[in-house]
Image (tube, rainbow, N blue to C red):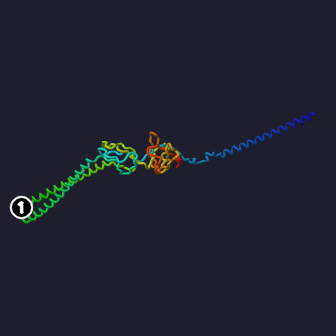
Amino acid sequence: MAGMVGGQVFKRFFDLASLGFLFLVLVSCEDSSRSLTSTASAASPVISPSAAQSAPPAASPETFSASGPLIVENQLDVASQREGMIARLYVDTGRAVHHGDLLATIDDRQLHADRDAAEAKLQAIGADVKNWEAEVKVLQADLDRTEKMWDAQLITREQLDHARFKVEADKFELERERHNLQNQQAVLRSLDIEMQKTQITAPFDGVVARRYVRVGQKIAIGDRLFWVTAVAPLRVKFTLPERFAGRVRPGQLLSVSTTESASSSHLAKIIQVSPVVDPASGTIEVMAELSGKPLDLRPGMTAQVRLQDVPTGNAQ
């Protein structure tokens, strides 16, 4: 009986020992597998998508809106170049004019009288010049005869010298009258210029935006008479942040619309970009010129400018 009990105990001990051995073998295999996995991971690191991209992402275009006044190149006040009284007005506000069209005249009656007198004096001096020229020719002929008579010993030395001195004196008189003639011609040209100043004309094609004077008004040199402005080509001047420096260039296209009618836009082209940045505002000044003659736009209006597909700073 005791022998049977001892055999059972020994068998149970043997079974437990076998289970323990199998457990150790399994644990050892699992550790080996983990070690191999760790080694493989260390040998082949995983590359992240961000690291795999060597080039930066493509820069996307930028759209920017700004506003600025509509202007024209030719726009100025027509001022008087001489004093006087307005004699006549030929145009009024809103009148379309062309270069050289007469706008007004200043009373020129005194100038006409002065010019007539100057022209008469010029003619008189011209007659004197011709008279002295004839006189010199006569005296020169007398001198030639006198020299021949001197060679023939028919006259004295004093008579020969007298004839020579008389010719020289008349030549000086002729030269003086010629200078007087030139001076009087200059006086006449000056009066002609003053006469032109009484004719107030349009300096360029455009429209009379304002009239400052009326008929009979006394004016002085420099007084404003009219404000004339061109109507085309229209230009818009606006500013952009300094980050746009180097990214906007002449020739680029943009759209222009009024602040009240944003749906109606017009095509414009950049014609000028400031080469420097304003340090006070950190902006650059840009000017664009509109195509054609938009009927809904006028100089002085505020326009909205929209730049599309402007390359970003990373764009080459």
**Which of 148 and 302 lies nearest the eye of the viewer?**
302
Residue 288 percent coordinates (x, y):
46, 48
Q: Is residue 309 left or right of residue 122?
A: right
Q: Is residue 94 left or right of residue 3?
A: left
Task: Give the quadrant of the N terminus.
Answer: top right
**Which of 243 and 177 lies nearest the eye of the viewer?**
177
Which residue is at 7% across, 60% downward?
159
Residue 289 percent coordinates (x, y):
46, 49
Which residue is at 85% across, 38% downward?
15
Residue 44 percent coordinates (x, y):
66, 46
User: Disc 1 marks which residue?
Assistant: 156
Crowd rating for badge 1 (residues with CA inside 10 Å; few <14, some 14–19, many 20+) = few
**Which of 150 and 20 lies nearest the eye of the viewer?**
150
Q: Quadrant of residue 123?
A: bottom left
- In this view of the protein, can residue 264 be seen by the observer? yes
- In this view of the protein, can residue 74 be seen by the observer? no
Which residue is at 16% across, 55% downward?
173
Q: Quadrant of residue 17?
A: top right
Count the labels in the image.
1
State whether residue 212 is above or below residue 129: above
**Residue located farthest toward the top when viewing the structure as drawn:** 2
**Which of 38 and 234 lies nearest the eye of the viewer?**
234
Residue 11 percent coordinates (x, y):
87, 38
**Residue located farthest toward the right when viewing the structure as drawn:** 1
Please name the amino acid that badge 1 sits on: Thr
Disc 1 on helix, strand or loop? loop
